[in-house]
Amino acid sequence: MPDVDIDVLAGKIVRFLETGDVPDGLFRPDVFLDLSMPTWRIQAAGAEDLIAVRKEGHPGPGTVTRWRADPTPDGFVFEFEERWPGEGQQWYAREMMRVEVADGAIAGLTVYCTGDWDEARQAEHAATVTLIQP
């Protein structure tokens, strides 16, 4: 994928995820989103609809605690973990995106999400499972 700095584009994704602000040049106007969650699937066509889906699911700011981006022939795979406050507690999700890039901007996102874990689910997981790597 020539002429695209994946780290720069990934950094713009992180900024969008953490703040809800859309950095210039992040999405093509005709971007397509296909989001799968454990028990639901949503699609959006166009940057405005994609942004609305994100803000509906995560209306406030959060933190991307870990991420990595690996190149593909037409973009990159973006794996990340995020945390955010809501309903009086801290939430957690782990997600993976297949990002398609055209003309230096995101043209398509296919997102797979673990679902939003509340503090009880996080505590249950921590008490039950010892992860080998973070």
Image (cartoon, rainbow, N blue to C red):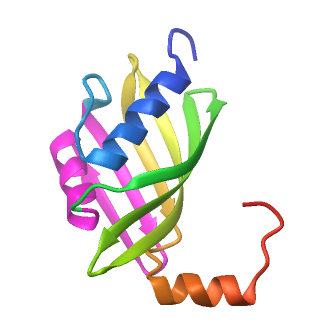
Which residue reaches farthest top?
Answer: 3
Is 62 located above or below residue 118 in the figure? above
**Residue 112's spot in the image, x, y percent?**
51, 61
Determine whether, in the image, residue 60 is placed left or right of residue 67: left
Quadrant placement of the N terminus: top right
Report the label total. Answer: 0
What residue is drawn where x is 26% and y is 53%? 44
Q: Is residue 44 magenta?
A: yes
**Residue 20's spot in the image, x, y percent?**
24, 47
Q: Is residue 16 magenta?
A: no
105, 69: nearer the viewer: 69
Determine whether, in the image, residue 16 is placed left or right of residue 132: left
Which residue reaches farthest right?
Answer: 132
**Residue 77's spot in the image, x, y percent?**
59, 41
Is 54 located above or below residue 128 in the figure? above
**Residue 53's spot in the image, x, y percent?**
24, 58
Determine whether, in the image, residue 29 is placed left or right of residue 116: left
Image quarter for residue 134? bottom right
What residue is drawn where x is 45% and y is 31%? 11
Image quarter for residue 90? bottom left
17, 78: nearer the viewer: 17
What residue is drawn where x is 43% and y is 75%? 116
Q: Which residues are magenta?
A: 29-58
Is 37 located above or below residue 29 in the figure? below
